Image (cartoon, helix red, strand yellow):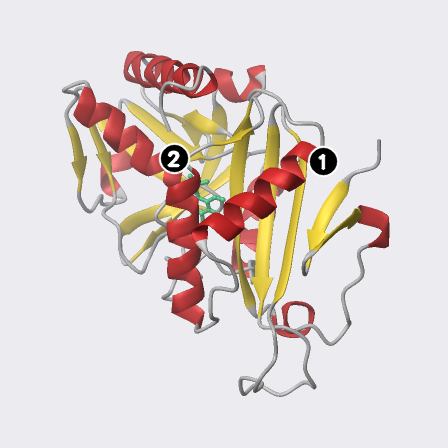
Amino acid sequence: MSNIVYLNGDFVAAADAKVSVLDRGFVFGDGVYEVIPIYSGHLFRLNYHLKRLNDSLNGVRIENPLSTSGWAEVLTTLIDNNGGGDQSLYLQVTRGVAPRDHRFPQNTPPTIFAMSNPMSEPSAELKAGIRAILVEDIRWKLCNIKAIALLPNILLRQQAVDAQATEALMYRDGLLTEGSASNLFVIKDGIIVTPPKSNLLLPGITRDLVVELCDNHQIHCEQREISVKELENADEVWVTSSTKEIVPVIEIDDIKVGSGIPGPVWKRLITLYRDYKNQFRAGNVQ
Ligand SMILES: Cc1ncc(COP(=O)(O)O)c(C=O)c1O
């Protein structure tokens, strides 16, 4: 069965979906996106993703082209067309097609694109923990917007790959921000800490779910600034994202984190996270 995508109102085979070379997403990286996991054919934490999409669109002054129910209908139809089950859904909205000019075009409809692909459970490699590098955050100061222009993230991720690592952890002015495609948690003496939401990091949906799970299970979790120095004494470090869930970082710049294996606090949280996911699959939570 060929993969179906959604483009500007139509569901078409991926090979038949065509966008103009003058699309501002292509020419300027002028657009925003979301990635939503699908479990057992259902969109996980959909309303949180749509709220963040709306915030991103507001942040770049593109009018949201669809209502919440409109998005839900489009995305659900797409998932069904691609066979349900577990998928990873990507959607993006750009400022549309117009002659190349930095100024916003007038009366130009946005380009709406969505695709979904099969997704498997996080690999054994991720569960065993990953290596990371520590790098300066070279991005702009609107990192709360999920912008499609990802060149700094791409350069830093490749720097990690070149160093035989999986993720680049970033800092700005001596404070940790997040990973190149993930949020960051640091654990010391059983206390879980993650940087507070600000314009310097993406408000991750997985991050928020981890904080929520901690709240619901009386686990001490703080949202505060974390200095780079605190990494040296950390017992555990994790990164989180929608498709990778909660991933232990066991080595940073060739130095072991704690004892160099996934720690007990991670085991507790990943169990709670998986339980929550199973409840979602069973239709017991949103
Ligand atoms: C820069 C950045 N931070 C954090 C995240 C994690 O966000 P979420 O949990 O919503 O997937 C991502 C996800 O791709 C990201 O690109």
Measured in 3D between alpha carbons, the distance from the residue under mark 2 to the one under mark 1, in whole angstroms, is: 26 Å
Look at the picture and state if 145 lies above or below 42: below
Considering depth in this image, is 98 or 131 the residue closer to the camera? 98
Q: Secondary structure at mark 1?
A: helix
Q: Given the image, on which type of amino acid does mark 1 rest?
A: Asn
Residue 252 at what x, y percent from top left?
42, 33
Q: Given the image, on which type of amino acid does mark 2 rest?
A: Thr
Q: Quadrant of the N terminus?
A: top right
- Identify the mark at residue 224; answer none if there is no mark: none
Q: Please say whether residue 233 is visible from this viewpoint.
A: no
Considering depth in this image, is 275 or 8 the residue closer to the camera? 8
Disc 2: CA contacts within 10 A as few (<14), some (14-19) or many (>=20): many
Look at the picture and state if 252 lies above or below 106: above
Considering depth in this image, is 125 or 143 the residue closer to the camera? 143
Q: Is residue 194 left or right of residue 29?
A: left
- Identify the mark at residue 206; answer none if there is no mark: 2
Residue 258 at what x, y percent from top left?
31, 20
- Identify the mark at residue 81; answer none if there is no mark: 1
Considering depth in this image, is 139 or 159 the residue closer to the camera? 139
Q: Please say whether residue 49 is visible from this viewpoint.
A: yes
Residue at the spot 62% in from the left edge and 88% down from the top edge: 101
Residue at the spot 69% in from the left edge and 72% down from the top edge: 23
- Dot in front, 2 or 1: 1
Precedes in sequence: disc 2 or disc 1: 1
Look at the picture and state if 195 lies above or below 247: below
The answer to which image quadrant residue 239 occupies is top left
